[in-house]
Image: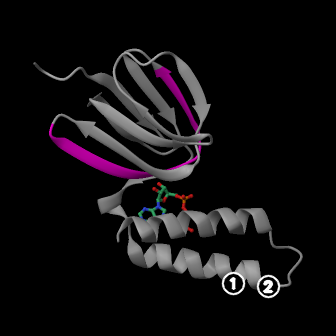
Amino acid sequence: MAEAKTRLRIVTPSKELYNDEATMVIMRGVNGDLGVLKGHQPLTTILDYGILKIKNGEQEKEATLFGGFVDVQPDAVNILTDSAEWIEDIDIQRAKEAKERAEKRLNSKDSNVNMLRAELALKRATIRLNSKK
Ligand code: ATP
């Protein structure tokens, strides 16, 4: 029997990353990892920074996902996120440079530096780099 599929849509401020069917979606919510199949009870939650996994039949895809919000319905999952990209599209050099920039800012004594912003940038760069290993 064919696996039951839900509709998954992932939108960032700059693009629609995914708009297709999925048999399973695994994402990192602020309260822990969340796996969703078709028929899931309605749920909304805030997303953490992490890796999102999509299974669609035999196919599997992984993307980074940086925060935002998910609305789960029995036949649809809608994700609005600040930033996301497919693992295979990650530019390692760019992530390394972002990590160095963030570390420099965090180590500086400059009171104009927004430390929270630098910490979040460091977290994004680290997740991007680790996702390739
Ligand atoms: P940077 O300082 O390099 O821009 P960032 O963490 O501030 O990194 P984001 O705000 O998360 O970048 O992302 C802005 C856009 O650039 C998004 O579309 C994101 O998918 C893309 N992006 C950021 N870093 C990379 C990367 N290393 N490889 C591929 N795409 C990236």
Horizontal side of 58 relative to 42 (left or right) equals left
Q: What is the quadrant of the C terminus in the image?
A: bottom left
Give the residue at the far left of this rendering: 1
Q: Residues within 10 Å of mark 1 (few under 14, many from 20)?
A: few
Q: Is residue 131 magenta?
A: no
Question: Which label sits on residue 33?
Answer: none
Marks 2 and 1 in Cβ contact (< 8 Å): yes
Region rendered in magenta: 58-72
Q: Which residue is drawn at the image coordinates 79% and 84% (left, top)?
A: 108
Q: Specify the principal SS of the magenta part.
A: strand
Disc 2 to disc 1, how far (Cα)?
Answer: 6 Å
Q: Quadrant of residue 116?
A: bottom right
Q: Is residue 62 magenta?
A: yes
Which of these two is toward me, 65 or 39?
39
Residue 130 image position (x, y, % from top left):
43, 69
- For badge 1, the amino acid type reads Lys
Q: What is the quadrant of the N terminus in the image?
A: top left
Horizontal side of 117 relative to 59 (left or right) equals right
Q: Which residue is mark 1?
A: 104
Q: Secondary structure at mark 1?
A: helix
Residue 76 image position (x, y, % from top left):
39, 20
- For badge 2, the amino acid type reads Ser
Q: Which residue is drawn at the image coordinates 66% and 62% (left, top)?
A: 120
Q: Is residue 83 above or below residue 98?
A: above
Residue 29 image position (x, y, % from top left):
56, 40
Q: Is residue 40 above or below residue 30?
A: above
Question: Which label sits on residue 108?
Answer: 2
Q: Which residue is drawn at the image coordinates 38% and 70% (left, top)?
A: 91
Residue 107 image position (x, y, % from top left):
76, 84
